[in-house]
Image (spheres, grey):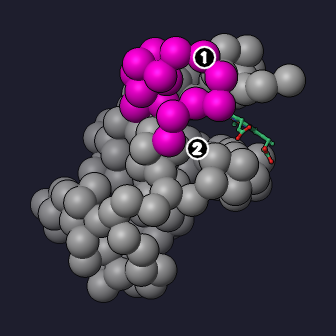
Amino acid sequence: MSRIYAFGLVFVALGLTSATFAGWTETRTADEPKPLGEIMEKAMKGGLAKKVASGKADDKEKLEFLDMMIDMVSHDPPKGDATQWKMMAGTVMMDAAKVVVGREGAGEALAKSMNCKACHDIFKPE
Ligand code: HEC
């Protein structure tokens, strides 16, 4: 199974055939990320992040989360250094990807890297 997830992950990352994979049905192009505010509301505040990190999310929810994390990294931050943003947001995305491919301990890593306050202190405008 994990091999299938790995392939799916590549497709999601490339923004290609994710629509046909694992029932994840929303089709978008690779270069139109969801707005950051929407990602925060849906992925972070909405509880999906916690669900994915705690291992309670199903496969579709994990992919949905990873998809939004890809979008998160695609943006430049509204405040702060763009390179530092890529590294911090990128770590969250990588940990989300590790959850999707089923790496052991990935949920704990995600819970750690996905530090709301640490990131907001640097990148969120007042
Ligand atoms: C990798 C960095 C990062 C992490 C991690 C992060 N956020 Fe955010 N968050 C941001 C940025 C940047 C903004 C400002 C977005 C903007 O102004 O466009 C934001 C804005 C928000 C907002 C306001 C959304 C809006 O409508 O503008 C909420 C709510 C939020 N975050 C919740 C959370 C929660 C809850 C967590 C932790 C589970 C979290 N965020 C983790 C970067 C992050």
Mark 1 C-beta to ligand 1 under 8 Å: yes
Residue at (16, 63) in percent of width and height: 7
Q: Quadrant of the C terminus?
A: top right
Name the residue carrying label 2: 54
Residue neighbourhood size for the residue with mark 2, other residues' Cα within 10 Å, grouped as few (<14), some (14–19), many (≥20): some
How far apart are the two marked residues, 1 and 2, measured between alpha carbons?
A: 30 Å
Residue at (55, 23) in percent of width and height: 112
Q: Quadrant of the N terminus?
A: bottom left
Name the residue carrying label 1: 80
Residue at (65, 23) in percent of width and height: 79
Q: Amino acid at mark 1?
A: Gly
Residue at (66, 14) in percent of width and height: 122
Name the residue at the right extreme.
126
Q: Is residue 124 above or below residue 24?
A: above
Residue 24 lies in quadrant: bottom left
Q: Amino acid at mark 2?
A: Ser
Residue segment shown in magenta: 75-90
**Does residue 46 appear anywhere in the picture?**
yes
- Ligand 1 quarter of the rendering: top right
Whole-percent x, y for residue 80 in the image: 60, 16
Q: Is residue 1 above or below residue 53?
A: below
Q: How many marks?
A: 2
| Left or right position of 32 against 41 | left
Whole-percent x, y for residue 116 in the image: 70, 27
| Left or right position of 116 against 94 | right
